[in-house]
Amino acid sequence: MDDILILTETKKQFSKAKKRTFQILRNLRLTVSSHKSRIGKLDADFHFLGVNFALTRISQSKSQVDVRVHSRTPRRALDKVKALSSRRTSGAHAAIP
């Protein structure tokens, strides 16, 4: 696993989600790189793995995150899966549309 994104509304929700995520990763014998990890308050739009996250203020105290998948992202993901499948099957046929 390469990238993980956790978005929550509260610090308490984040703490719980982070704890559970780390438990799962430990069980899978995976580690989190501390120098690549970032924790912070969402205060600006950002792009993550072909997905745009845009922060929209609803009121003075409330915001929402609008999520838009780039039009090429699903095709690129499918192409990667096809490439990996063809390398791993080496002669066998994989049916991926």
Image (cartoon, grey):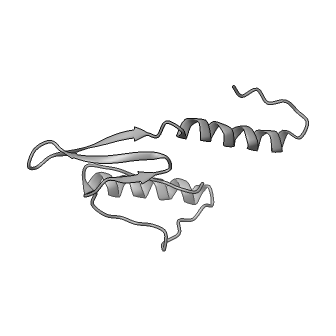
Q: Nearer the viewer, residue 97 or 17?
A: 97
Residue drawn at 30 percent across, 51 percent down = 13
Image position of 72 with respect to 49: above or below: above
Image position of 96 with respect to 13: above or below: above
- In the image, farthest residue toward the right: 91
Image position of 76 with respect to 32: above or below: above
Residue drawn at 35 percent across, 47 percent down = 53
Q: Nearer the viewer, residue 94 or 31?
A: 94
Image position of 6 with respect to 86: above or below: below
- In the image, farthest residue toward the left: 60
Is 85 placed left or right of 57 in the picture? right
Is 53 placed left or right of 28 in the picture? left
Residue drawn at 48 percent across, 72 percent down = 34
Is 16 placed left or right of 30 in the picture? left
Q: Quadrant of residue 84?
A: top right
- In the image, farthest residue toward the bottom: 35
Residue drawn at 82 percent across, 44 percent down = 87
Q: Nearer the viewer, residue 22 or 77?
A: 77
| Residue 97 point in image, percent of width and height | 69, 25
| Residue 66 point in image, percent of width and height | 31, 40
